[in-house]
Image (tube, rainbow, N blue to C red):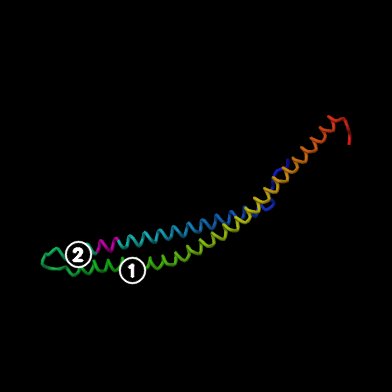
């Protein structure tokens, strides 16, 4: 029996490589998104810590308020706020990139799937041809056996 060889195997392999590249691109953008989300969380946590420290400083009731300390706390909070705002803007751009990368991945997957379907059909046709060939051979053997047992030659 002859082996199945898919004529478009190089095309399928190329489409698989493209799909893997698109998967890696999506993963890279996902990592960037996670990094920015973590950065925003850290900034929010730092702002909360700064506000808590400022509240503790103002509520200490020592009689006098150290304006320099209050100014430093407010400045630090503002700095964290600006960092968080910058990260949010970057994150918006990353979401756009992520959407585009996912669309490209879907397209690459669809292209690969189309060639896989062609391969499945070709394999099915190959298997059908083999079954048909085997059935013809069995029929021929049965006819030959019958003619031997009957002693007649056609």
Residue 96 at x, y percent in the picture: 47, 66
Q: Nearer the viewer, mark 2 or mark 1?
A: 2
Q: Which disc is residue 55 wearing?
A: 2
Extreme residue in the front direction: 150
Camera-side residue of 47 and 7:
7
Q: Quadrant of the C terminus?
A: top right
Residue 140 is one of the magenta-drawn residues: no
Q: Which disc is residue 82 wearing?
A: 1
The relative height of residue 1 versus residue 36 in the rendered view (above or below) is above
At a point 12% along the width and 68% down the height, the residue shown is 64
Q: Which disc is residue 71 wearing?
A: none
Position of residue 120 in the picture relative to residue 40 (left or right): right
- Magenta-drawn segment: 45-50
Q: Main secondary structure of the magenta part?
A: helix
Q: Earlier in the sequence, mark 2 or mark 1?
A: 2
Position of residue 45 in the picture relative to residue 24 (left or right): left
Label 1 sits on a secondary structure element that is helix
Position of residue 20 in the picture relative to residue 53 (left or right): right
């Amino acid at each position: 029996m002859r082996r199945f060889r898919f004529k478009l195997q190089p095309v399928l392999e190329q489409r698989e490589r493209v799909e893997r590249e698109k998967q890696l691109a999506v993963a890279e953008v996902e990592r960037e998104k996670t990094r920015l989300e973590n950065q925003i969380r850290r900034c929010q946590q730092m702002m909360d810590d700064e506000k808590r420290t400022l509240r503790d400083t103002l509520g200490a009731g020592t009689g006098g308020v150290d304006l320099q300390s209050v100014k430093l706390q407010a400045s630090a909070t503002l700095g964290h706020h600006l960092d968080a705002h910058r990260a949010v803007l970057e994150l918006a751009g990353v979401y756009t990139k992520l959407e585009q990368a996912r669309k490209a991945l879907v397209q690459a997957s669809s292209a690969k799937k189309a060639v896989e379907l062609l391969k499945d059909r070709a394999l099915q046709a190959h298997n059908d041809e083999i079954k048909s060939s085997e059935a013809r051979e069995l029929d021929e053997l049965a006819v030959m056996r019958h003619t031997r047992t009957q002693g007649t030659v056609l």
